[in-house]
Image: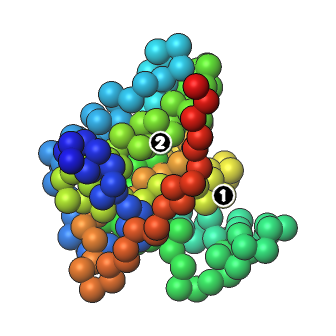
Amino acid sequence: MNSVIKNIYERKSVRKFLEKQISDDDIKSIVEAGIQAPSGHNAQSVYYTIVQNEDLIDHMNLKAKEEMRKSDEDWILKFGSNERYHVLHKAPTVIIVSASQEAYSPVEDSSAAIENMMLAATSLGIGAVWVGLIDHYFKLDESRKKLNLKDGYKPYFAVCLGYENPEKVFNKPKRNMDVYEWIR
């Protein structure tokens, strides 16, 4: 099998990490893979904030969960109320993915960058998971200052990175393959 396709098949969401920090070189490689992603009208609108401060990561988790507990959605309320749940999965590195508000397609640009980053992480033996629930923290005024976000940029998602805990490995869920058809 082609090595790129094999890497795509092997990529999975990792939510249990070792405390060991990943190297700056690996983080740079992962972010630079994100930079290579396509963007609407070639806006190259995505900006990356790399967070390795454990106190800040825990703070974002606590504040996001406080907001989640106010949700009308039962499943969000449930996660926000679960004391064992950590929105950022106690990852040693969290990359906040923001995009320019001037961009034609900021969510799509961010999403393409994230997929590239997760594939790069997999190729380096690093676990990754895409986190959307962190948007509950991004809604707070304090988040802009704490994350030193660039003016004109909006944070959309987080990517949690670290080495997968070998004692808590989960298999990738089986994929539904009956989702396409040919029109010739």
Q: Is residue 124 left or right of residue 81?
A: left
Q: Residues within 10 Å of mark 1 (few under 14, many from 20)?
A: some
The residue that label 2 is drawn on is 97
Which residue occupies 18% across, 53% down?
Answer: 124
Q: Is residue 114 left or right of residue 126?
A: right
Residue 83: assigned label = none
Q: Is residue 64 left or right of residue 166?
A: right
Q: From what the image shows, is residue 172 above or below residue 25?
A: below
Q: Is residue 176 visible?
A: yes
Q: From what the image shows, is residue 176 above or below residue 43?
A: below
- Say what amino acid the circle numbered 1 marks: His
Q: Please, what secondary structure does the residue beneath circle 2 have? A: strand
Residue toward you, 10 or 81: 10
- Say what amino acid the circle numbered 2 marks: Val
Residue toward you, 44 or 66: 44
**Which corner quadrant of the image does residue 169 belong to?**
bottom left
Residue 117, position as x, y percentages in the image:
34, 44
**Which corner quadrant of the image does residue 22 belong to?**
bottom left
Q: Please, what secondary structure does the residue beneath circle 1 have? A: helix
The residue that label 1 is drawn on is 136
Q: From what the image shows, is residue 67 above or below residue 118?
A: below
Which residue occupies 41% across, 63% down?
Answer: 13
Residue 31, position as x, y percentages in the image:
30, 39
